[in-house]
């Protein structure tokens, strides 16, 4: 049997070349930033993307404290956590969380867009989020990633 020569190749872990990206969340909408970051982390922007292999890059998100939500969404959004004990339901609003732990807002948004398995946990570890504009990853020589939309 003769084939046409076009063979679909599946990427292997050692074939993937990882890059470092810096995403500035200053004045950007939370969901739009999170979806672009999840795409970079997963590796869907690459031609060699394979669903069962970690093909993604490292992503550094700066200015997490300056991310915004539209209209009344900042007042309405509530984060839920259950401690495991009776009466252990904990609720925090977006405004509370952005003042105390702004990094967690972006981490939770991106985590919800990644696979819910061991691969998703490995991919999520490549996300580095910082509240301010400074980060300690200069030796990795990250490149600026321009988000395709602006407010």
Image (tube, rainbow, N blue to C red):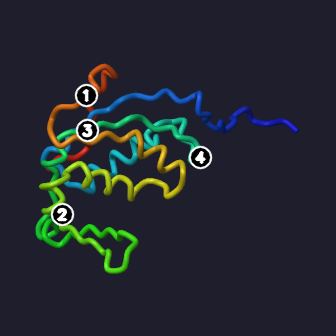
Q: Secondary structure at mark 1?
A: loop
Front position among marks 1 and 3: 1
Query: The N terminus lies in which quarter of the figure?
Result: top right
Between marks 1 and 4 in the image, the one whose residue lies nearer the viewer? 1
Circle 1 residues within 10 Å: few <14, some 14–19, many ≥20: few
- Tell me what residue is drawn at x 15 percent, y 35 percent: 133
**Could you say which is closer to the camera, residue 44 or residue 103?**
103
Query: Residue beneath label 3, please?
Result: 23
Disc 4 vs disc 2: which is toward the camera?
A: 2
Say which residue label 2 marks.
Answer: 94
**Residue tagged 4:** 52
Q: Position of residue 58 (x, y in %)?
A: 38, 35
Residue 127, image quadrant: top left
Dot 1 and dot 3 residues touching (CB under 8 Å)? no
Does 80 sit above or below residue 122?
below
- Rounded to the nearest angstrom, the CA distance separating label 1 from label 3 is 14 Å
Residue in the image at 56% along x and 47% along y: 51
**Secondary structure of residue under mark 4:** loop
Which label number is shown at residue 136? 1
Q: Earlier in the sequence, mark 1 or mark 3?
A: 3
| Crowdedness near tag 2: few (<14), some (14–19) or many (≥20) residues, C-alpha within 10 Å | some
């Amino acid at each position: 049997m003769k084939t046409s020569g076009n063979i679909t190749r599946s990427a292997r872990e050692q074939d993937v070349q990882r890059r470092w990206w810096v995403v500035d969340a200053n004045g950007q909408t939370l969901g739009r930033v999170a979806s672009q970051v999840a795409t970079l982390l997963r590796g869907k922007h690459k031609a060699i993307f394979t669903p069962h292999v970690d093909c993604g890059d490292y992503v550094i998100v700066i200015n997490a404290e300056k991310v915004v939500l539209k209209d009344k969404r900042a007042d309405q959004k509530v984060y839920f956590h259950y401690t495991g004990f009776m009466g252990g339901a904990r609720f925090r609003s977006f405004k509370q969380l952005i003042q105390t732990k702004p990094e967690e807002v972006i981490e939770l948004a991106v985590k919800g867009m990644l696979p819910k398995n061991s691969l998703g946990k490995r991919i999520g570890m490549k996300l580095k989020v910082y509240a301010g504009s400074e980060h300690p990853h200069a030796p990795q020589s990250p490149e600026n990633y321009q988000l395709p939309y602006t407010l």
